[in-house]
Amino acid sequence: MNRHAILTITGYNEDGTVTRQSAVGEYYERNDSLFVLYEDETGDGLKNKNRIKLKGKRLELVRKGSVTTCMIFEPGLKHVTDYSTPYGMTKLCISTESVKALRLGDSVEISAVYDLSDGERVINRCKILVNIEFHV
């Protein structure tokens, strides 16, 4: 059963930068996986369709639109992704330290701690926190 979801995604970088984004979307579970589908708008008015998938300790964030990427967070593994924007494309390596999920009544909180690198050197140490509140 699909449920309406209100989600807040907060990103923390080692330099102290914090970004926060809120959106309304659809939440559902299938085959031991949690999914959230939502749209967001970039600063220049373009839109992205996004999907969050959590299965066990593997978190995926797929974005399609003005920003296109498939970021995979999986503890102990390195995943390489193309990160494409209207300004160009870059390859990023994601080395994940941890992925945690906590269900609290009608909400789920997911966190991931990871390093972003260009394949040779770490660019930034990051944490993402996804809070999902779902409603019938």
Image: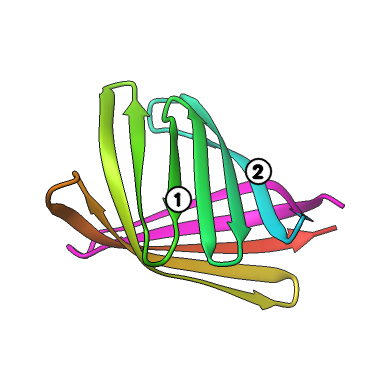
Q: Residue extending furthest front?
A: 77
For residue 101, which numbered disc appears in the image?
A: none
For mark 1, give the secondary structure. Answer: strand
For mark 2, give the secondary structure. Answer: strand
* Image location of residue 88, percent across then percent down: 26, 22
Q: Earlier in the sequence, mark 2 or mark 1?
A: 2
* Image location of residue 59, percent across then percent down: 52, 57
72 horizontally vs 91: left or right: right
- Residue under circle 1? 72
- Residue under circle 2? 37
Q: Disc 2 vs disc 1: which is toward the camera?
A: 1
* Image location of residue 31, percent across then percent down: 76, 56
- Residue 117 is covered by the magenta coloring: no
Nearer to me, 45 or 48: 48
Magenta span main SS = strand
* Image location of residue 39, percent across then percent down: 59, 37
Q: In which quarter of the view is residue 44 placed?
A: top left
Relative to 63, residue 16 above or below: below
Q: Residues within 10 Å of mark 2 (few under 14, many from 20)?
A: some
Nearer to me, 86 or 35: 35
The boundaries of the magenta stretch are: 1-29
For the residue marked with disc 1, what is the amino acid?
Ile
